[in-house]
Image: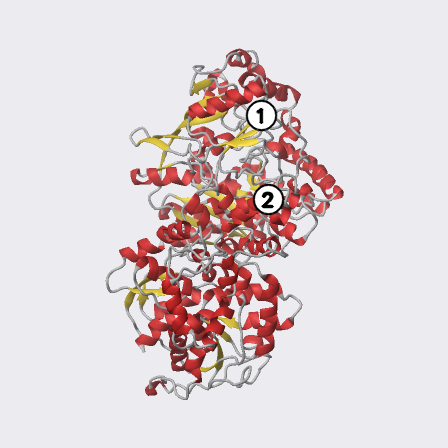
Amino acid sequence: MDASNYRRVPVGVVAPRDAEDVAAALRVCAEAGVPVVPRGGGTSIAGQATGTGVVLDLTRHMNALVSVDPAARTAVVQPGLVLDRLRDAVRPYGLTFGPDPSTHSRCTLGGMIGNNACGAHSVAWGTTADNVVELAVTAYGGAAHRIGTGWAGAPKGLRELVEGNLALLRTGMAGGFSRRISGYGGLDALLPERGVRLARAFCGSEGTLGVVTEAVVRLVEAPRAPVLAVLGYADESAAADAAAGLLPYRPLTVEGMAEDLVRGAAGLPRGRAWLFVEMRDEGAARELVRAADALDAVVVTDPAGQRALWRIREDAAGTATRLPGGEMAWPGWEDCAVPPARLGAYLREFRALLAAHGLRGSPYGHFGEGCVHVRIDFDLVSADGVARFRTFSGELADLVVAHGGSLSGEHGDGQARAELLPRMYGPEVIGLFGAYKDVWDPAGGMNPGILVRPARLDENLRFAVLPATPFAGEVARCVGVAKCRTTDAGGGPGVMCPSYRATGEERHSTRGRARLLHEMLAGEIVRDGWRSAEVAEALDLCLGCKGCLSDCPVGVDMATYKSQFLHHHWAGRIRPLAHYALGGLPTWLRLITALRLTRAANTAARLLPLPGLTRERGLPELAAEPFTRYLSAPQHPPAPPHLSAPPHHPAPQAFEARVRAEPGSGPQGTAPTATPTVTLWPDTFTEYLAPEAGRAAVRVLEAAGLRVTTPGGTVCCALTYVSTGRLDRARKVLHRTLTALGDVRTPVVVLEPSCAAALRTDLPALLPDDPRAARLAAAVRTFAEALEEYAPDWRPPRLDRAVVGQTHCHQHAVLGDAADRRLRERAGLVGELSGGCCGLAGNFGFEPGHHEVSVACAEEQLLPALRAAGPDALVQADGFSCRTQIAQLGGVRARHLAELLAEGL
């Protein structure tokens, strides 16, 4: 699979190390009559990166930047090089590569050449074909070609084919515009008056002619301080009609989207549709705003503000897959293009065609070049739905052609549209396309079924093999845009996917795991179902960080899928010892403490290796006194008298104190009184391993004027049972917890981010029919959220220090850290905490075989930040796992934000 609706099973995969390997593979495959499919990042949305023969994975080894010539403004690249790596390398020279698809963090140069990719800046710098100088190509059978401008390196018969069809090339390919990508749309570059540009004509051939093993690409000067003008319009049609009129102002981008895609994003001007127009400087941007006939406009000069707005656009390939009601929408008609002057009229008719078929989608895209992306809620499972998909596709193709457009404006035709190319080009040009392929690939071994003699657009649909189950629907949610394959989380706020960045292996990416689960459910290749060793191996390195839940544009939740898999995989069998030792951690710690064996347990952990756990790291020590035992003492250290904090009263029952309810205010209808009450959740880590964080939180909360109480009875969020897939046990623990709590009438403050995330998301998911679960989930507050919401006038102590450390991955993915950032700012804590994942991730870092990956994750952001910190910097990490990782690998003690504030008091 790639990022399309299609699935084809190859006979094997080869990861060549160099051009000689590619030639050898192509010779062997030609001798055996086996097709070959070259593949880059696998982000193609039309199915052209799937195939039934041998797939060449060019990303594993052939991913180098060979050389850069800043004076000539060229670079020599291998096909598996990710675009962002090229851009990073040439940035010091003030240069960049012009085409920039939204998948720039994981798409490869070879894939861009294959699809003639464009991106947002093609208004200024053109398509990939416009920026390629030379190509080294290996044909099926192993013959090598070096092509550029002129006939040198051309395969035998190509010159004769072109010279015999000059009239057809001049008339049948006429009427072109910048986004005519469909078919072999660059074939007219071989005309003598066009300079016989062989390399340009090869671009966009979608792997059907040969394999690119090296490319010389042209670089452009990067704008030093681009400025973003965002123009608001009354509706999508108005924005589309206005786009072409902005081109005389020489914009770098003209991107369009409407409210059904943006869904309430902050920072946009008034309107129901917007154009994002990037200009070279602020003066040009303001001139454009004055000339534009827009309802409203904002000019964004701040780079961070620009990045935040551009992220809306870059994630659109995924967010457009989720309609406002939560339904899924699919690619297939992702990137049709019409001449820009026709865009408004085309979109109006396109919307009408959707409505006529009872379909929905949210168009957006490169309005300045008339290219429209859209994902549509096709039913690609039932026979009736697939038939409607086919009928709609034909009618839409006719509509695009009627407006003088191209079926593909950026991503290629693949299997999704190649069948319909005769409607766009006519039989003579289609015949010429076939002859062009046959000159390059006479045996027909290169990516057959794509572009020439194509497969039907409704064949090989990936959904057909899945059972009709809810879990299969979740797995199918992964559309393959591969944001999880980015190799650098340090350039942004993301977490996903730490194990892929540590290993570089597709099976350890979120997408790779989703695809393996897909095959497990299909049962054709992975045939042992839930007992699959292949799936278990891939999921073993999933840290359960939940980064994909927030960072994946379609919200794939691999941590939950892993729990489901482990639940079934080990059903009725003896589990790994780590599942009992760490999965049952709350029970073990409660028992050890009840028997007063804390000191003995700590001694044993230091001297004896525990069965089922790695010997490469020590276990954290149990605290001498649990958190709640400290609270039950007759007197614990009060808040400073001048702060007039109310005394703490431990509750003997579920909750002794109640606040008076007023409808519509506070959690679950409660309203803060003169002394608001909060319930501090004694999570396992705070209770038995880090009570100092709990004591500090009590002190701070009381200093802020809040009354602190704790639940009576035994409560647990069941996190460790969920993470090890012991879901039946987790449900029992959660039922017991809800019974112990009774009616939740106060905000529940949870200090451990992973426990707060479990209560907010896992609890209602595991007990969907218990209304108490939803009430508790809604009552959960982080430490910073509770202070901001229930003590808004409290002023924290000024610490005025630099701070480093780790934002917990569950905080990033589930809870959000905006309140924490504001609280740190008010306390004078300066600096950013590291993103990504610390790598310990609860039980993950203590399990055998995980230590190397655990350390690699910490080395990505966290440990470098600690080494670079000044000697006076404070180290903060609210997660117990993060603090443990920092202590063991960084050699310093990190503290919860509550501890830092308590010391400031």
Pointers 1 and 2 in contact (C-beta within 8 Å): no
**Alpha carbons under labels 1 and 2: distance apart:** 31 Å
Residue matched to label 2: 374
Assign a secondary structure to mark 2: loop
Residue type at tag 1: Pro
Which one is nearer the viewer's eye here, 114 or 841?
841
- Report x, y in % for residue 817: 44, 64
Mark closer to the observer (1, 2): 1
Q: Residue furthest right?
A: 384
> Is the residue marked by circle 1 packed among few (<14), some (14-19), or many (20+) residues within 10 Å?
many
Residue type at tag 2: Val
**In the image: residue 800, left or right of residue 774:** left
- Report x, y in % for residue 719: 52, 64
Q: Which mark is residue 235?
A: none
Please tell me which of labels 1 and 2 falls first in the chain.
Answer: 1
**In the image: residue 869, left or right of residue 540:** left
Q: Is residue 364 above or below residue 891?
A: above
Can residue 572 be seen here? The reply is: yes
Can residue 188 be seen here? The reply is: no
Which one is nearer the viewer's eye here, 430 or 140?
140
Q: Residue at x 53, y 81 (%)?
A: 712
Coloring scheme of the render?
A: secondary structure
Q: Residue at x 39, y 36 (%)?
A: 97
- Report x, y in % for residue 265: 51, 57
- Report x, y in % for residue 233: 54, 51
Q: Is residue 577 above or below residue 819?
A: above
Quarter that holds the N terminus: top right
Q: Residue furthest left?
A: 871
- Quarter-wise, where is residue 90 in the image? top left
Which one is nearer the viewer's eye here, 96 or 685?
685
Residue matched to label 1: 35
Quarter that holds the C terminus: bottom left
